[in-house]
Amino acid sequence: DRVFGPDTSTDEVYRCVAQPIVKSAMNGFHGTVFAYGQTASGKTFTMMGNEDHPGLIPRAIQEIFDTIENTPEREFLIRASYVEIYNENVMDLLGPKDSVKKNLDVREDKDGNVFVNNLTEKICNQPEALLSHLKMGESNRHFAATNMNERSSRSHCIFKVIIESKLRSVELDASAINVSHLNLVDLAGSEKAKHTGAVGQRLVEGASINKSLSTLGQVILQLSENAKFIQYRDSKLTRILQNSLGGNSKTAIIGNVTLASMEETLSTLRFATSAKCIKNQAVVNEVISDSALLKRYRQEILKLEEKLKITNEMMAAKEQE
Ligand SMILES: Nc1ncnc2c1ncn2[C@@H]1O[C@H](COP(=O)(O)OP(=O)(O)OP(=O)(O)O)[C@@H](O)[C@H]1O
């Protein structure tokens, strides 16, 4: 919808692209922001940034907790997961460091929601906690060298924040809980293998990366043409992002381009042009069942309070004897 020049600050990109989606996610809409482009075009710089220039993800994290502070009438529960898709394997970046869970299954629940099975989710009540999980996940990521970018990331990463909230004034059983997912995605470089001089293991990685990315390209094209069949199931990336791409989600795609290759720039712009034609149908996601964690936690607290009451009564009776 718009072009950002070389002098644009990440802050401006955040305010134009990501902030409206983060704000909507705090109000119950699913949201997704992802960066697409060739290696060394600035995807990681845009999404993660560095100490001096925080990227969209750390800014979104800050916004989430600022919103919580400024919305005293609602109770929030925030949790996060972080997966890496590497050679079509889905890995859990937030599990214990010495035993990173690999090859996780992607499944669908009875309501048609796609999820990664057995994935670690961390509950966070401060921005620092969420940021430290992000950093921990980052240190588990695969980085390898190619000719185009020494610290080139060869994998797709999805940092997901799940936001649950309810009005404090309404009894838990009577009120619906908003449950929204905010996906912040850093894709692997979209360049073709011939440019990177990839051989051996690097070439295998290239093939897998390109499988996910070429499926992503196909899916975007099919959605933009209102095709009857969309091939989400052909790659892990499109399967996990199914809802974000053609469903109930507010989604922004950032196409990063560089002067390094006219051909790749053109291909990124074609991808973005198709993506612009897609119309998603986003709605507020209210849950009244027990699937919301807030509800299960509240029930747990009630049970524990009841147990504590009984124990206290028993102790008081003993003291009287
Ligand atoms: N807007 C920017 N301002 C300053 N430096 C930038 C900017 N964008 C990218 N860079 C720098 O350019 C280099 C490549 O960027 P980055 O690693 O973000 O690319 P990438 O698209 O994520 O690459 P890959 O696909 O290999 O992960 C990095 O050293 C990064 O710090």
Image (spheres, rainbow, N blue to C red):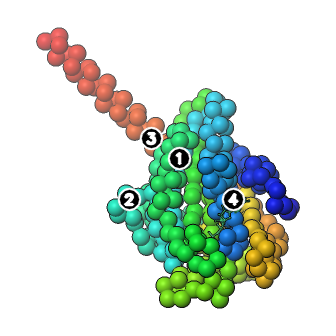
Name the residue tied to disc 3: 297
Q: Describe residue 221's horizontal placement relative to residue 66 as left or right.
A: right
Mark 2, Cα crowd under 10 Å, few <14 / some 14-19 / many 20+, is few
* Pair 1/3: label in front: 1
Q: Look at label 1 and name its amino acid.
A: Leu
**Cβ at disc 4 under 8 Å from ligand 1:** yes
**Cβ at disc 2 under 8 Å from ligand 1:** no
Q: Residue, x 50% and y 65% (percent of image)? A: 141
Dividing the picture into quadrants, the one containing residue 172 is top right
Q: Are marks 1 and 3 in contact (CB under 8 Å)?
A: no
Q: Look at label 2 and name its amino acid.
A: Lys
- Does residue 268 sit above or below 135 in this rendering? below
Query: Quick check: can you spot residue 108?
Result: no
User: Residue 108: x and y, percent?
Assistant: 52, 68
Query: Quick check: can you spot residue 66?
Result: yes
User: Residue 126: x and y, percent?
Assistant: 53, 39
Please report whichever mark, 1 or 3, sits nearer to the chain's N-terminal start. 1
Dividing the picture into quadrants, the one containing residue 66 is top right
Dot label at residue 130: 1
Mark 1, Cα crowd under 10 Å, few <14 / some 14-19 / many 20+, is many
Please report whichever mark, 4 or 3, sits nearer to the chain's N-terminal start. 4
Q: Are marks 4 and 3 in contact (CB under 8 Å)?
A: no
Name the residue tied to disc 4: 46
Please report whichever mark, 2 or 4, sits nearer to the chain's N-terminal start. 4
Q: Are marks 2 and 4 in contact (CB under 8 Å)?
A: no
Q: Look at label 4 and name its amino acid.
A: Thr
- Tell me the CA gap for discs 2 and 3: 27 Å
Name the residue tied to disc 2: 97
> Quick one: 16 or 37, which is closer to the camera?
37
